[in-house]
Amino acid sequence: MVSVPLLLAALALVLAWPVPVVLSRSRWPVRSPFTAMVLWQAIALAGGLSMIGALLVYGLAPLGGNLLQSTTELWHVLTENRSAESLGLLHVFALSTAGLLGTHLVFTLLLTYVRIQHQRRRHRSRLDLLSFPSKETPGTVVISHPVPVAYCLPGGGKSVTVLSDGLLDMLSADELNAVMAHERAHLAQRHHLLLWTFAAWRSALPWLPTSQLAFASVNALVEMLADDAALLRIERASLIRAIAIVASGQAPPSGVGSGDVLKPLTASVLDRDPDSVPELESTADRLRRLLTPQQPLPAVARYGSLAGSVGLTLMPAVLLLVPGLW
C-alpha cells in the first residue's frame, strides 16, 4: 500500500534535482528548442503532481484503495463526524502538507499573474507618456533613448513592440526587419504565458533546483524559438547583426564573422555589472547558434522526446487514479 507513495516520492526527487541539472547542461536543446520546451513543461508538471501526489496518497491510503474511494471517505469523515481512527498523525500531517502545498502553488500562480498584469499596465501607461507611434511599422512605439532597446509588451489586442530611437539610428532596414520579426514571434507564440508559469513556479519553490534551472532555460529557449521564427522571414546575417547591436550597444563591423560579432559582446560582458552577465551570456549562445548552425535532432529523437514528455506527464496521474495500484 505504500508502494505508490514511494514511487511518486522517488519520481518527484528525480525530477527535482538530477533530471533538470542534466537537461540544463545538455547541448541538444539548441538543435530542437521546441522539443526541449515541451520536456521542461513535462518535468515541471510531473514534478509538481508527484510531490503533492506522494503526500496525498500516503495520507489517504488508510481510507481506501483508490483516490475516489479514499477521498469520498475523507469527505464523510469531515462532514459527518465519522471515525477517523485509521488515520495516524503522520497521515494527517501528509494530507495537511499536500493541501497547503497545492494551495500555495495555485495561489502563487494567480498572484504572479496579477503582479505581472499590474506591472504591464503601469509600464504601458508610462509608454503612453514617453513614446510615440512608429510611422513605418504599425503596433510599434518608439522611445527617446540613445541605448539600443527592443522588446515586446504583451497585452492581447493592445500588444506593442517597443524600440528606442538609438536602436533605429544603428539599424539598417534589413536589421530592423529582423528585430521586428523576432519580437512579433514572441507575441504570436505566446511566450509570455510560458514565462509566467515558470516565473510562478520559481517564486513558489525558490529552493527547488528545478524551478531555478527551468526558468533560466525556458528564457533561453523562447529566444531561440523567436530566432527560428524570424529566420523564416529574414536573412541569417541580418538577424545576427541585429542581435549583436542590441546586446553590445554598438554596430559591429560590416563582416559577419564570429570574431567580428562576438568581440563587442565579450567587451560588454566584461564591462557591465555582474548581474547582467547571465543575460549577455545567453545572447552570446544565441549568436554562436546562429553563426554555426547545427543539424536539427533526427525525427526519431524528436518524436521520442515528445512521447517521453507525454508519458512523464501522465505517469503521476496514472499512479494516482488507476484503481488497484494502491
Image (cartoon, rainbow, N blue to C red):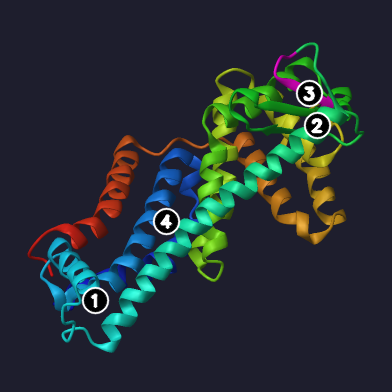
Q: Amino acid at mark 4?
A: Ala
Q: Along the horizontal axis of the image, is 13 left or right of 68?
A: right
Of residues 41 and 20, the one nearer the viewer is: 41
| Cβ atoms at labels 3 and 2 below 8 Å apart | yes
Tell me the magenta residue range: 137-142
Residue 58 has which mark?
A: 1
Residue 127 has which mark?
A: 2
Residue 136: give x, y in percent of width and height. Answer: 78, 11
Q: Report, in whole angstroms, how far the alpha carbon at label 2 lies from the one at label 4.
A: 35 Å
Q: Amino acid at mark 3?
A: Val
Residue 235: give x, y in percent of width and height. Answer: 64, 20
Secondary structure found at label 4: helix
Q: Amino acid at mark 1?
A: Tyr
- Quadrant holding the C terminus: bottom left
Q: Quadrant of residue 122?
A: top right
Residue 196: give x, y in percent of width and height. Answer: 55, 47
Of residues 223 and 71, the one nearer the viewer is: 71
Question: Badge 3 is on which residue?
Answer: 141
In reply to whether residue 283 is colored magenta, the answer given is no
Q: Report, in whole angstroms, how far the alpha carbon at label 4 lies from the one at label 3.
A: 36 Å
Q: Is residue 212 visible?
A: no
